[in-house]
Amino acid sequence: MSKPIYILNGPNLNRLGTREPEIYGHTTLAEVEKMCRDSASGHPIVFRQSNREYEIIDWVHEAIDEGSGIIINPAAFTFTSMAIMDALKMFPGPIIELHISNIHKREPIYHKSYVSPVATAVIAGLGTNGYTVAVQSILQMNGQSGS
Ligand code: CA2
């Protein structure tokens, strides 16, 4: 059995699809999870969300032991968490930092990411479709096809 891709989502994203649809769209996080599983066509996916920083750090540690790639939307922790950055530094495989919105079009407080310097790639502004692009890209980077 191949190692799973970890898809980790930070604070408030459990409410996705319920507010600010002009920025984040109408798709819920449960629908995003289904899109990711469909896109991975059988490749194992671990899909999680937490409002707690320590839980995301623990999941990065789990991915270090068991994962083939990490896709992380750290949400507000993007701009605050050296601890998530330090955990990600220990991951040996590909890491994609993902934002549904284009954070660079927004106010200056959204421009300085702690995660980008330790990520393999950054996706921002593709809406929730960015998740499927990220899944395909991790599969390709790991030589496991992708389209
Ligand atoms: O665009 C993204 O994916 C973000 O990571 C989302 C974060 C925001 O702090 C980042 O700057 C960009 C915020 C997520 C807020 O959660 C929502 C909950 C319900 C509906 C929409 C967003």
Image: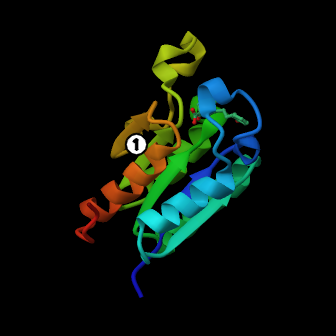
Residue at (38, 50) in percent of width and height: 133
Q: Nearer the viewer, residue 69 or 53?
A: 69
**Within-10-Å neighbours for mark 1: few <14, some 14–19, many 20+:** some
Residue at (39, 82) in percent of width and height: 2
Residue 139 located left or right of residue 34: left
Where, quadrant-wise, is the N terminus in this rendering?
bottom left
Q: Which residue is mark 1?
A: 118
Q: Nearer the viewer, residue 103 or 19?
A: 19
Mark 1 residue element: helix
Amino acid type assigned to the residue bearing label 1 in the image: Val
Residue 60 appearing in the image:
no
Residue 114 located left or right of residue 23: left
In terms of image quarters, where does ligand 1 lie? Answer: top right
Ligand 1 has an atom within 8 Å of the beta carbon of the residue at disc 1: no
Image x and y of residue 16, in percent: 70, 42
How many labels were placed on the picture? Answer: 1
Furthest residue to the front? 26
The answer to whether 33 is drawn above or below residue 80 in the figure is below
Here the colouring is: rainbow
Where, quadrant-wise, is the C terminus in this rendering?
bottom left
The answer to whether 102 is drawn above or below residue 106 in the figure is below
The answer to whether 12 is drawn above or below residue 39 in the figure is above
Residue at (55, 11) in percent of width and height: 108
Residue 89 appearing in the image:
yes
Residue 121 located left or right of residue 66: left
Furthest residue to the top? 108
Res 41 quadrant in image:
bottom left
Image x and y of residue 111, in percent: 50, 19
The answer to whether 135 is drawn above or below residue 24 in the figure is below
Residue 47 located left or right of residue 37: right
Res 43 quadrant in image:
bottom left
Image x and y of residue 96, in percent: 41, 48
